[in-house]
Amino acid sequence: MKFAIVKRDLIRIFTKYFVLISVITTLLIIGAGYQLFIKGTVADIRSIGVIDLKEREQQKLNLIDTLERLKRLETRYNELTYEEIKQLEYLLPDEREIPYIVIELKDFIAANGLVLKSIDVGVFKAAVGEEEEETKAVSLKSLNVTVTIEGLDTYAQIKDFLDKLGTLMPPFELNSFSYAPDRTSYSLNLTTYYK
């Protein structure tokens, strides 16, 4: 009998406070679900967003710096005189020095601790069209060289190698840089100039 009275009182309390009990139960379920499932994911997303934002800002600053350097180079290029252009002719190797260019590139790759897998020297061609003799400053020819190398493991190593390559004499212009994920080798297509 006491059990029936307690049961009746519980049912009356439950019906009287049904909305309140439902709201509290719903809030508890939502709170527990958030703590168990969502909170960790939200924290991960926020941390990735902050890292990505910082990385993007650094990339933006690097691009702005590169653009400023290119503008300065363009200004300097436009200010070159005929005599300065003529002096460039002395910096460029002769056609008979082409084998030494290839040897110098091979030595440069070895000096940077890389393995040269292959080197392919393309066809010799004129880089500057034939002009009248009075107006012709420097007659440039270009040489296309494709090298396959191994030994670059990180982005920093790749960047350092390409920076060093940009300072090599004779100058090499990087046309393409490709990497196959299934291999550990990189293929570089370069152009160098000679007279």
Image (cartoon, rainbow, N blue to C red):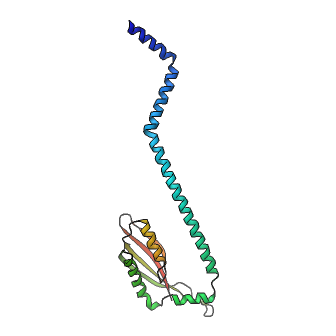
Instruction: Determine whether 45 is above or below 58 in the image.
Output: above
Count the numbered circles shown: 0
Q: Residue at x 58, y 66 (%)?
A: 64
Residue in front for this viewpoint, 15 or 58? 58
Q: Residue shown at 59%/73% (left/top)?
A: 70
- Measured as percent of width and height from the top left, residue 127 is found at 53, 84
Where residue 5 sits in the image (x, y, percent)?
Answer: 42, 8
Quadrant in which residue 152 is drawn:
bottom left
Q: At x 39% / y 7%, what residue is drawn? A: 2
Q: Quadrant of the N terminus?
A: top left
Q: Position of residue 75 (x, y in %)?
A: 63, 77
- Please indicate whether residue 30 sits to the left or right of residue 152 in the image: right
Horizontal placement of 79 versus 108: left or right? right
Rendered view: 51 above or below 137: above
- Residue 60 at x, y = what percent? 56, 62
Q: Residue furthest bottom?
A: 133
